Image: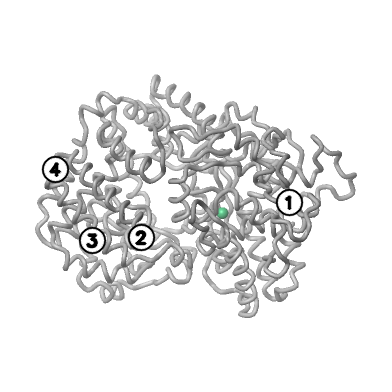
Amino acid sequence: MVRRMIGGLLLAIALPLGAQQVKPLDPANMDTTCSACEDFFAYANGGWLSHNTIPADRPRWGSFDELHEANYAALKATLEQAAAHPGPDPDTRRLGLFYASCMDSVTNDRIGPVPIEPLLDEIRLLRTRADVEREIATLQSAGVGAAFSFRSGQDGKNSERVIGQLSQGGLGLPDRDYYTRSDSASAALRDQYREHVAHMLALTGQGTAQAAAAADRVLALETALARASMTRVERRNADSTYHLLALAGLRSLTPGMNWPAFLRARRAPALADVNVAQPRFYHALDSLLTAVPVEAWRDYLAWQTVRTFGPSLGSALEQESFRFNSTVLQGVAEMQPRWKRCVGATDRSLGEILGQAFVRTHFTPEAKARAETMVKNIRASLRQRIGQLDWMSSATKQKAYTKLEAIVQKIGYPDKWRSYDGLEIVSQPYGVNIMHAAAFETRRNLAKIGKPVDRGEWGMTPPTVNAYYNAGQNEVVFPAGIMQPPFFDPKADDAVNYGGMGAAIGHEISHGFDDQGRKYDAKGNLSGWWSDADAAEFEKRADAVVQQFNGFVAVDTFHVNGKLTLGENIADFAGLTIAYHAFRKTLEGKPEPAPIDGLTADQRFFLAWAQIWRAMSRPESAKLLVNVDPHAPARWRVNGPLANMPEFQQAFGCQAGDPMVAPAETRARIW
Ligand SMILES: [Zn+2]
């Protein structure tokens, strides 16, 4: 599924108790000693930045996280109730037993890695390449990211059908570049990773020397996979990851692999063809399966298994996993309290059961009606903006209107909840439940191959504080979790709601027309519906956004990657523009609203956008995100698009030459 989100990769969940007290726009967050025309992020959020610190158990802190904290308290109450009174309803029992088993630290510490021992025993017995291929299939079915990824997904050029999707994978560090960079900081991080692998393996019973030697082989094998992998920028390109192959084509790409045996072992439905997103990766993998000794594959597969399930197998593995993934990679000093980790795990494993309770208490028909009106107005605004473009031909405009009209909007929660029938949750230990849930999910996913696309499905759980556009289904999706203050407040003025939730809605809708989204047509097919001249003109205009963001510093000497963040930066710029004009349209025929707290309606619109992005980040976390997150850091999501907008500059009286006014000759102009 091709999804473009509003929030970062590491943002999770949210519900609101206490969120009612959050003002959608709070003058106390501002620092009016800063000039709005010099650094609008600091002007809007300087007060908040000086009064807050990042909690010890978080990589960063901002409005998303504030909502997340309040929401977790509500989810906790639901789960404690279910754990205390599981009752006869099978889904409530699943919730209660899962959460209780997660909270049972005594049993988990006593059992430790026992739940994965049958898998580790199997891995120790591998002797041949055929054994390794079969074990990769077994582990993938269990939910382990072994060597590569085989999942179901929409056919990029025939959006009615679900096919098998083969993609690169199998790494333990956050990105392939972590393995290939030659600078000393990257080399030092790889040393820390190697130590971490050895520690984790030792905790499952390997001797220290054996585990250290295994870690060397793991790093060497993962490095070979990384070298064969596409970069994140390359993977963003929808055209370069579409390679539909009949099974005969797959055989000639990877002559050494026994695909029929693999597909049988995965219990995949019959398939005639498959999309191979990164053919070069599979070509290299085929060679590695022969060239790398089976002993190294055994170490690697054991490591991937321990890595996947370790955090659920007692405190020794959990703490070592935390030490590397949270402390080393993100600078986080303290583990979250157990109940928060368990709420998060339940949302990930049983999200559409937990979400039902959430929407009963946290989402109203009134909120849904307000949101639907905003979406309707913002779509109309984009249509009008397209009509005014002087660089797009009328033929392309007609097709753009068709696509815009076809966008499906999903708000709040699914019409039909997912079934968890067949998922066995036991009273203990937790590791077994996590493994059951992971295996259930991989079965559910693969079973879709060959079936029609289920257009009712959701890719996020209802309490999630985030939203997405899915290009394959040409749909925008807004979970109940984000439809709350400070993003959306039924009691707030329109200026604030359009600057917050409205711009987020505009962001998602406009993803259908960003540098990748624009390649998909109204039905969600990669089809090249733009005229060549219009496409070339768009690319030129998008390149101005790439150059603009390349110039921003993310942290220390690390610059924002303008190409990695292009789709999101276009969506922010477009979303703000169309939400602003949709807001102005609501005022037509009415007097200009009186200032509130000394701020005009237009000023409040732009301040609302800036304040939802109030955030601070640990330097380690910022370095991780600049590598992996397709979103720019919060400061630049505010200052970048606003510096391109005359509407903003007029609202605050900014002049040519001010930092918040992009120079006319390089300024981006798209929608
Ligand atoms: Zn986005």
Q: Which disc, if any, is residue 262?
A: 3
Q: Amino acid at mark 4?
A: Thr
Q: Which disc, if any, is residue 476?
A: none
Q: Amino acid at mark 2?
A: Asp
Looking at the rendering, the quadrant in which ligand 1 lies is: bottom right
Mark 3 or mark 2, earlier in chain: 2
Mark 4 or mark 2, earlier in chain: 2
From mark 3 to mark 2, how far is it between C-alphas?
39 Å
Q: Secondary structure at mark 4?
A: helix
Q: Secondary structure at mark 3?
A: helix
Q: Which residue is mark 1?
A: 37
Q: Is residue 221 left or right of residue 183?
A: left
Q: Amino acid at mark 3?
A: Phe
Q: Nearer the viewer, mark 4 or mark 1?
A: 1
Q: Which residue is mark 4?
A: 208
Q: Which disc, if any, is residue 183?
A: 2
Q: Nearer the viewer, mark 4 or mark 3?
A: 4
Residue 160 vertical position relative to residue 306 in the rendered view, above or below:
below
Q: Are marks 4 and 1 in contact (CB under 8 Å)?
A: no
**Dot 3, how many residues are within 10 Å of its Cα: few (below 14), some (14-19), or many (20+)?**
some
**Total marks in image:** 4
Mark 4 or mark 3, earlier in chain: 4
From mark 4 to mark 2, how far is it between C-alphas?
29 Å
User: Residue 593 in the image: x percent, y percent?
Assistant: 85, 41
User: Residue 657 in the image: x percent, y percent?
Assistant: 74, 60
Residue sitting nearer the eye, 83 or 313: 313
Q: Amino acid at mark 1?
A: Cys
As drawn, the residue found furthest toward the bottom would be 533
